Image (cartoon, rainbow, N blue to C red):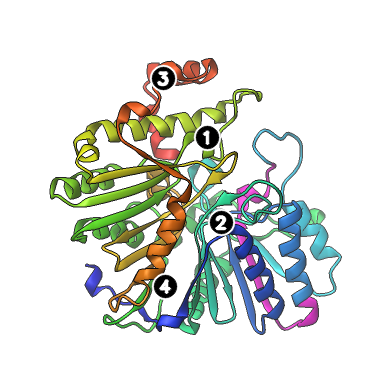
Amino acid sequence: MLSKLGGIPLQSESLQWLLTPKALRAELLKRIESATHSVYIAALYLEDDEAGREVLNALMAAKQLNPELDIKVLVDFHRARRGLIGHKGDSGNYFMYRKVNEAAEHQIDILGVPVKSREFMGVLHLKGFIIDDAVIFSGASLNNIYLHQNDKYRFDRYHIIESSELARSMREMILTYLVNDVAVSSLTQPKDAERLPTKVEVSSLKHRLSKAEYKFASTKIGNRVTPLVGLGRKKNLLNKVVVAMVEESEEALFICTPYFNPPYILVRALAKHLRNGKRIDIVVGDKTSNDFYIPPEEEFSTIGALPYMYEQSLRKFAKRQQWAIENGQLNIHLWKDGRNSYHLKGVSADGKRHLITGSNLNPRAWALDLENGLLIQDDNESWKQKFEEEQTHILEHTERLYHYSQIETLHNYPAPVRKIMKRIKRLKADFLLRRIL
């Protein structure tokens, strides 16, 4: 499948790596300031905090300097209209958007995309900062921790692709399937004249998004990049490419995911890969580097059980594949760096095919959220060394798992976590939860 997949030709100098969140922040601000014709930003959210306001102010300054500059910011509708988890009251990032836009001489488009009628049923997980003829691709959203504004950071992957055709294709998809859709609404509307999407409009948007695709002039030879988008289980090209990368890999896989809860079809493909004598390296966040982790000394809430649920999923997989861990075929690397968190996603196969994506490689991403990714095929091995250097950087704060018993069991967990997980097991709700988490 992958060798027949068309892509956009790339020169060796067209791909660059940013290895830190601070580098992403600096590059993003620099390119916004120097943008000449368009800035399209797609992220789960643009937060009302220091880093988020810095990015928004940079966009407003660029628009003031060049009123003809086409600026569009797309975030998840539901996420923008609620406060942080645990925060009560009428809050949400859209208050900031409205206030900043009302004070500006030249306004910009900040749009909310309601992928589903409720946030837990699916969100806009589309990624990409498309500035003029370049694409900065990362799984990061825009706030203090993702951009390392203060002491803590959330580790992600950051790549720059210089390609006018890729940038055009990604802008066109956003315009066609999102900006021009009746269900997508402005998040800067005056409160007294606000029009929100109806349930019928949101429901019909889901069906239209399931048919979304990137259109581009393609080649099937040489170094190339293929933009991929997917929503739902049926005809989801992004999901199919992930499975194909595992099935078509001849030697080794390098996989990054913050939460280990892969869909069954992917688990089956990984197990077959190991049985055929091939190697897999999986880099996954330690439970303490999960963004939902709550330290024992802090007040516990239900959402804090998530990291422990993911850890038990990893333990189950490791136990079944202990034989492969022992013979060196399966290497599970747990990432932990103090109180910082881990958010990396992606798959590399045989050092020649690399998927950079915001997808968590879990049932929710594969069925509920609108996801995208870029498949880079390095037929000429122009970037082999650079990808290896990135992988070395990723592994810097990891510890290899030598036996599944190194992962804690329910017995070792804090009392509130044990109580919640026992209740989930008693109600047999774990199957449903795995599909939406």
Describe residue 58's horizontal placement relative to residue 298 as left or right: right
Quarter containing the N terminus:
bottom left
Query: Magenta span has 299?
Result: no
**Which label's residue is closer to the chain start, 2 or 1?**
2
Q: Position of residue 222 (x, y in %)?
A: 29, 82
Q: Mark 4 is on which residue type?
A: Tyr
**Badge 1: how crowded within 10 Å, few (<14), some, or many (20+)?**
many
Q: Is residue 191 above or below residue 89?
A: below
Q: Which mark is residue 23?
A: none
- First of labels 4, 2 by sequence position: 2
Observer-nearest of 340 and 304: 340
Q: In the image, what residue type sits under mark 2?
A: Ala
In magenta, the rendered stretch is 63-83
Q: Residue under circle 3?
A: 410
Label for residue 214? 4
Of labels 1 and 4, earlier in sequence is 4
Q: Which mark is residue 288?
A: 1
Location of mark 2 (residue)? 140
